[in-house]
Image (spheres, helix red, strand yellow):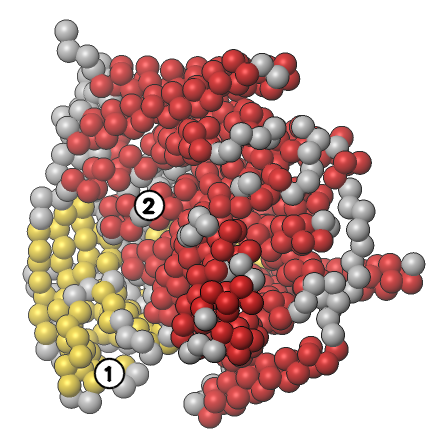
Amino acid sequence: MRKKVIYAVLGVAVLAAAGLMIGRALQTSLVYFVMPSEYARDAASFDGRRIRLAGLVEPGSVAFDDAGLELSFNVTDAIQTYPVRYSGAPPDMFQENGGVVIEGRFHDGVFVGDNLLVKHSNDYHPPEDGHVDVEALKESLR
Amino acid sequence: MQLELGVVGGAAAFLALAVALYGAVVGSVGAVRRDARLLTSARLAAVAGFVVATVAVVVMEAALLTDDFSVSYVAQHSRIASPVWVKVVTMWAALEGSILLWAWLLSGYTALVAAIAPLSPLRPWALVVMQGVQTFFFFVLAFLANPFTVLPNPPLDGPGPNELLQNHWMMAVHPVLMYLGFVGLTVPFAYALAALITRRPGTEWMTSTRRWTLTGWGFLSAAIVAGGWWSYEVLGWGGYWAWDPVENVSLMPWLTATAFIHSVQVQERRHMLKPWNVMLILLTFALAILGTFLTRSGVVSSVHAFGSGPVGPAFLAFFVLVVLFSFGLLATRWEDVKDRAELDSLVSREGSLLGVNVLFLALTFAVLLGTLFPLIVEAISGDRVTVGPPFFDQVTLPLWLLVLLLMGIGPLLPWRKAEEQSLRRNLAWMLGGLVVAGGLAWLLGVRKVYPMLTVGLAGYNVVSLGLLLSGALVPRMRLAQRPALQVLRSYAHENRRRVGSMIVHFAVVVIAVGVAFSSGYRVDEQVRVDLGDSVAFEGYTLTPTELFVDPTAARVSAGAIVEVRRDDRLVATLRPRINVFGGSSRAIPTPDVLYTPWHDVYLNVNSAITPDTTFVILRVVKSPLVTWIWVGGLILVLGTAYALGGATRRVAARVSVPAAAREAS
């Protein structure tokens, strides 16, 4: 009987410790996937967090310094636009008006990314009249 | 009239479905009525099912190799210009074909069980379960993902398979190993259900499937390591494991299967953990199906996600069915399965095996949670999130280290209860190993916690293996008065299962050290170099001397020839490149690697290569000891094969030490 109590207490303690550990780990490593306009709406809640910022590369904003390996461009969803810095070469298929997902953090209004993915989706084409359906765009960049 | 391949293949798929359904129905009726004629018919159906499925596979391969674009799968996924090996493996490069491969391997295993498994009260029901699973797969193949649809207006050429998949020969190996693993573990699952159905919850279902289980586990392990190496050689980021959902879903059944392999020993020796063992194998199979649902439904995206369609929901329905049926059955049989023995002491073999089981289940749970959490969050709040590698690292690393800790002490503990004196002596030796190895790592400059702990635990485990071996060999040497090597050879021959497990445990140590260092001390940089210039990287000098272009019928390769020097001595000439496969505009960066025992130098081209290119941007990764992961994987497979080999093991093991000594004298 006493043995059973000891095992039960041990079991509960282990489970509680595991739960705490998992909860904390989830809290720190959850990465939200947001569009620039969504970020703008709720910037405070993403403060200092690592996020995946998705949108289109704004035409005319791309600059690549091949000596310093610094890529900068603006990411936009037609409602909100943010400047992005990325250390490294632009990946293959990186182009103006193309879909991108950048993983990183905001520092003083500039999004500093350490991972840049190009999304070449067939489902979404930026419309010519400038009106963008953000939900459809977000879906296509997933 | 010429018979079209698509028609023949489609007919074979439907016939295979009919045969599997027939076998399942007739087999269960025969088992209920104990009618030998019906049971024989079901067994023959199992063999016939394999023959019919083989016809479907041969037809598919023939269509691929002859570029018969009237077959829908060939039109969608093959290309005339592909080399022969790519055409052969294209069969499993997309959804429909991969289901055909799985179904075919399953029918092969079913036929094998029908042909060679000894007659037992369990076999008929096990065959029914396997034919039931086959029914599902052939149903999906025939109705939901039929690759044999005949196109009235076949195209002249197709787009070819996914570029990432045709970029490396591992495509021929890894998926097949994975399915052989999943299918192999279907056998113990089927026998476990058979044991529940027939109310024979003893050890028979486990012992009679031990080889099948170990074979399936070996294939699954090999598949996971091979998949890691493939991703290392192909994906261009210099890593091998990204906690990608598709990697996770292959790991989960492996974790539960590994737990199962360990806990069955407790039931064999002590008749405990009966319900636990049944649950583990049910869980293993269910997780394999869940994983297929997750990766095939487009719910999570990855290179393995073949897009959405009715196949995903079908797998989800099958998963729900499997879980409800098998766990429901377990619930109704609970009184038969319930344990009656109790654990004497935690400090015993069974205690350590139970402990390692808890750890493996905790790992499974953590991986499952991390994989499913984005789906849960999206369902609740609509937010899109991903759970990054930091979660998996934080949660699983301590658990992996605890696994290493138990792996060292567990096999040294006796059954029932350990004697304090021998336990202390063994522990002292092993802690010595831990301190020496850890100290050595410290002297060599290792300061990070996890690599340090891993090296320490590696030393501890090596000492443990030494103690295990010497504990077995020293008394035998005294008795037999023979040199150590001879005694070792005969011991290893007589105790294949035990020696095999030692080899596998050693392999795990090797892999652990490789993982700890390659992830803990990885250097990852991007550098820009003009052609002809040099750049220094971690003691190496990298010189891209010139560009090269290497076109073949299937693809165009363009890259840089990079000379790698160390101390002014040329150690390698690497050719990282960018491949563009015809029929696609997608450029696939293809790394080149200098493999050495101490560390790899991994080069990937990150900039476009055109005739007027004057500089290249290289991603350069140095991963210490990463090669030992692949070496460890190989040792693990060899150890598993060693444990499986030798059919006369049981007879040989009966020969006691004194008898062996008499024989020798």
* Amino acid type shown at disc 1: Tyr
x and y percentages locating residue B592 in the rendered image: 23, 65
Residue drawn at the location 18% of the way across and 82% of the way down: B565
Q: Is residue B375 visible?
A: no
Q: Can you give x and y, in whole percent of width and height, for residue B508 in the image?
A: 48, 66
Q: Tag 1, which chain?
A: B
**Residue located 60% across and 50% down the image:** B260
Question: Type of residue at label 2?
Answer: His
Q: Compared with residue B201, is residue A67 higher up or lower down, i.e. above or below?
A: below
- Above or below for A97 versus A133: below
Q: Residue furthest right?
A: A1
> Mark 1: which secondary structure?
strand
For label 1, the crowd category at 10 Å Cα-Cα, with few meaning under 14, some 14 to 19 and many 20 or more, is some
Q: What's the residue at 29%, 56% (across, down)?
A: B234
Q: Looking at the picture, do discs 1 and 2 lie on one chain?
A: no
Secondary element type, mark 2: loop
**Figure quadrant of residue B14:** top left
List the residue tagged with mark 2.
A120
Q: Which residue is mark 1?
A: B540
Residue B520: numbered disc: none
Q: Nearer the viewer, residue B159 or B323?
A: B323
